[in-house]
Image: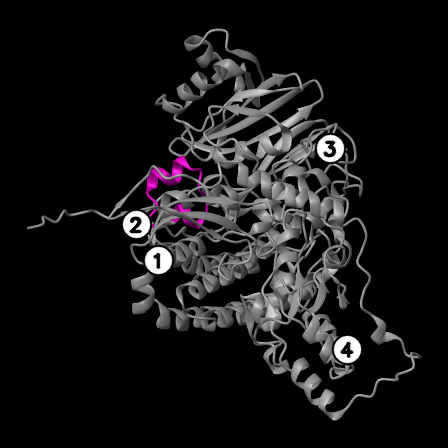
Amino acid sequence: MEVSSDREDIYTPGELDREEGQVIEELKAKSQEAIPDPDEWLEEDLERNILLTSVDAIINWARRSSLWTAMCFPACCAIEIMAVEGPRFDLSRFGMDILRASPRQADLMITAGTLTWKMAPNVLRIYNQMPEPKWVIAMGACGISGGIFRSSYNVVPGYNRIIPVDVYVPGCPPRPEALIHGIRMLQRKIAGEPVLPDLPQFLQKGKQG
Amino acid sequence: MTVALSGKEIASQIEEKFPDSIEESSQESLVVKSDSLLSVAAFLKDTGSLKFDYLNYITAVDYYSYFEVLYQLTSLEHNHSVIIKTRCHGRENPAVPSVIGLWQGADFQEREIYDLMGINFTGHPNMKRLFLWEGFPGYPLRKDYL
Amino acid sequence: MTTTEIVTLKTEPFVLNFGPVHPSTHGVYRMRATLDGEVILDIEPVVGYLHRGIEKLAEERTYTGFIPLTDRLDYISPMSNNLAYCLAVEKLAGIKVPERAEYIRVIMAELQRIANHCIAVGSFLNDCGAFFTPFLYLFREREKIYDLFEMVCGQRVTYNYMRIGGVSQDIPDEFLPALRKFTDKLPGFLEEYDFFLKQNEVLLARAKGVGILTNETAIKCSISGPVARASGVKWDLRKADPYSIYDRFEFDVPTAEVGDCYDRYRVRIEEMSQSLRIIRQAMSQIPSGPVRADVPHLVRPPAGDAYAHIEAPKGELGFYIVSDNSIAPYRCHIRPTSLINLSALREMVKGWKVADLIIIFGSIDITMGEIDR
């Protein structure tokens, strides 16, 4: 077979880059305020008029004991995630040893690294591709508020500008013990979630990327 | 030990071959006029006794009235090095010839300087922004940004 | 009777995007590969997804306050970044470092080299298909080095240990015995590793002869570090332009001839043994004394510029600092080892297949923090 070199490009050189640049600028203009955290589960005195049935308990136990992480590790906190996966602080004892490359098979996103405006549309796309129910742990100072790089021109001041965050784990980078504490906190949150009354709502939620 | 050659010594050798191409020279470095940069660089690379075949790095500094582009060259054979600078005045469209024909390692570094400082390298085959996206307003590393 | 014509099928090259989030690109690296079927015709790297503007932030921080930012550059070997930056400022300001601090710096830099090569070799073997086993074994050794570093400065990953004029605090008494225990055990481990992997058929089939980088291309593209040494360029800054006190130690510089992925892997394994040699010599010669020169906290170097480079585990890492006699640098440029080593990738992958692209990319050993800064 011979390779023909006179092909018609769909995009002229440079046009693709300009389009991607426009996407980034639009996202930057839209994300000027932080998305509020889904933290009603922390309210102690909220009257719980939702009964957790035993079916809920079983479903929640299954969900929290087998969290699969989507792979999205920009920067230095990735080293501590590698350490947590390692033999010393074993993460597979929590059921989390699968690091799926495909976000469509994941339900937890641990944001390990600084988010830049250039990377932001990609992270948003990965978040949208994850099916419900999904949770986000913002790891490290850069994930919470931009960290040591907050005053830079290309750094998003915290992941909660782009995606809603469930648990924040401070540190730069957080020690593996701190990350495991954050994961356990998320597991407590998942244990308290009512599943069955919300099931019709889940069936109605159509737009999942 | 890598000997950092004196700028004045190299300047005298270059002046013999290419008169009127050196702006100033000192112990640490020498400043070359930007239009004779390519010929001086080729001379430094090919002459037997100098033979600067390894480009360490290229960088640029913004001194309000002019931009200064710096090259450090090393000779692996003779184990000596030299620093060459060139200046471009004016903030609107500063331009410097590209040395990618001589040292291919200059490829990404020149794109980076264009991206962050706005200095155009004439003759570079792919002068695009490297780190920031097309449509980013301004050049961040300039002193008058933000 | 009909005659049949022979028609040659034409194919078109297509562009495949290896996105910023990919299991085998080490960090957020994106490339657009032009493929003809499985064979690679060209690649175009797209970087900048981790561009945090560290060079611009340097102009806002003081000289000492910039040291934590240097940790986050090449986050797999932060001690080397600290060392290169401190050497540059000391060269600019003319500060002399006390003897004990020099020895401590050498021990830390060589330990960091071993730790870096653990991850480099581990992830290279990960890409080759040995899914996680050698990586986790090497990570066990890296955890031991983390323990040593934690004893010294309290941090596991981003150390912020070196200061301008020395190191921030002295090593505790239990450090040297623990280091001796580590250096006694490591050669046995490296032997066990070699026993399983050196003549492994799968590794030889996947890595030998793949992605050859010739001597001339390496020099032309300004490659440095183990990648250049595997191609026959005998250039190691610790021997050619000794900084700190490296001229007092005896060690070899491993090189190879062919320049394929297997050679790069062997060079890194040999470098780990040579680093052990340097550490043992430093441990036996270390004197007592102060660990930090008498330098004010707000350093004000005289106006001028200086460039200092070290042989970091990935190659030549250098800092070019311009000062105007104020408390913050006027301009700080970092010579990005990984970005310059990346410019050889295009030469190395033309003609190979997609699976080989992943291995060749893994064998260069890059870190996005250093490329994007």
Identify the residue position indicated by label 1 in the image. Answer: C262
Looking at the image, how many numbered discs can be counted on the residues? 4
- Tags 4 and 1 both on a single chain: no
Q: Are marks 2 and 3 in contact (CB under 8 Å)?
A: no
* Residue at (32% x, 43% y) in the render: C214
Res C301 label = 3
Are the two marked residues, 4 and 3, in contact with CB atoms closer than 8 angstroms?
Answer: no
Outermost residue on the left side: it is: C1
**Tag 4, which secondary structure?**
helix
Give the vertical position of A181 relative to C160 (above or below): below
Mark 2: amino acid:
Val
The Cα atoms of the two marked residues, 2 and 3, are separated by: 45 Å
Q: Are marks 4 and 3 on the same chain?
A: no
**Relative to C333, is B98 on the left or the right?**
left
Q: Are marks 4 and 1 in contact (CB under 8 Å)?
A: no
Question: In percent of the image, x 14 and y 47: which residue is there?
Answer: C5
Callout 2 touching callout 1 (CB < 8 Å): yes
Residue that carries the numbered disc 2 in the rendered image: C258
Along the polypeptide, which appears first: circle 1 or circle 3? 1
On whether residue C138 falls in the magenta region, the answer is no
- Residue placed at 79% from the left, 88% from the top? A52
Q: Position of residue A32 (x, y in %)?
A: 79, 48
State the residue position of label 4. Answer: A189
Q: Earlier in the sequence, mark 2 or mark 3?
A: 2
Question: Can see residue C178?
Answer: no
Residue most extreme to the front: C1
**Image quarter of residue C131:** bottom left
Point out the stretch of residues depicted in magenta. C211-229
